[in-house]
Amino acid sequence: MSKQQMNAPPEPTEEARAKREALADWLRRAGSVAVAYSGGTDSSFLLLAAHEALGEHAVGVIGISASLAGGEREEALATARAIGARVEVLETEELDDPRYRENTTNRCFFCKHELFGKLLDWARANDFAAVLDGTNYDDLQDHRPGRTAAGEQGVRSPLLELGFTKQEIRALSYAAGLPTWDKPAAPCLSSRIPYGTPVTPEVLAKVDAGEAAIRSLGIRVFRLRHHDTIARIEVGPEDFGTILERREELIRRLREAGYRFVTLDLEGFRSGRLNEGSRRP
């Protein structure tokens, strides 16, 4: 296991197993569900639970747009195949919304409003009773305007409602053999762009190409923060050596992506960094 991978989590606690049973009961009462599915740890666990409880009456739905990192769709589809669950793909047009492109601190609201609106329309047209997302209890600690969009549109969050923590989800996912049990968080590419800097397809493609270059070094946990002509790389201190050893290759590829300057942030990676200081909804 590489240094970027987590150690295997402890066995799920009795409390976590009880929540897992409660989730199965919750899903059976729902009858049929469409899961907002990204292939991440939380939505993969929820899709597995829904598939086990409801079979063909559970489906994962992936929203596809320029803000989705390259390779994420294929990974998500591969995980769904391993689960045995059906997945539908919907194209979303959040970039057509000028409020999203302006990239204010509530950008995520407009993205989720678009996604959930499309998903709810699809669910109604295909006779699914509920639309679910993978929000968990720990997500309440971060700035997440998308939660407001979910609440306004009637999207349910059973992992949150039943009090699942991220640690419990990872432990239960590992016990179930899900390959996503230790997957790092992978928010949309727009989260790499500082608030106030417009989001455009060109900038998103630039960030995506830059992150692909970092990923090719074997680093799993990182962010490329976009600052116009500057690429600011955030990795854990344990990966500083890899960046420096292969800096010439990395500089070349980031310049090919469109960056003029390449920097390594000595504070290292910290999830949600652009949200620090943002007002929570």
Image: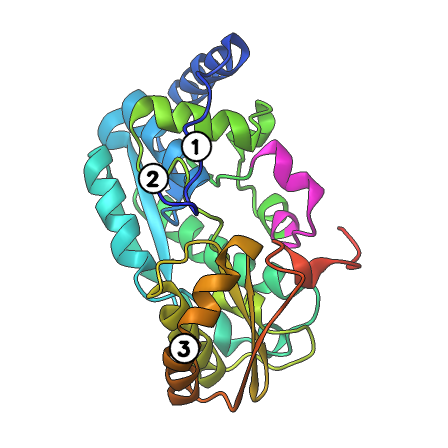
Residue 19 location, x and y as percent?
50, 16
Callout 3: SS: helix
- Whether residue 93 is visible here, answered yes or no, is no
User: Circle 1 sits on which residue?
Assistant: 7
- Given residues 120 and 36, the one toward you in this image is 36
Is 70 magenta? The answer is no
Give the vertical position of 256 relative to 165 (above or below).
below
Between disc 2 and disc 3, whose residue precedes? 2
Instruction: Pinpoint residue 120: horizontal percent, then vertical percent.
Output: 44, 49
Dot 3 surroundings within 10 Å: few (below 14), some, or many (20 or more)?
some
Q: Is residue 229 left or right of residue 256?
A: right
Which residue is the site of mark 2?
1
Task: Specify which label sits upstream in the sequence, 2 or 1.
Answer: 2
Question: What type of secondary structure mainly makes up the magenta span?
Answer: helix
Label 2 element class: loop
- Nearest the eye: 92 or 261: 261
Q: Secondary structure at mark 1?
A: loop
Determine the residue positioned at 45% across, 30% down.
170
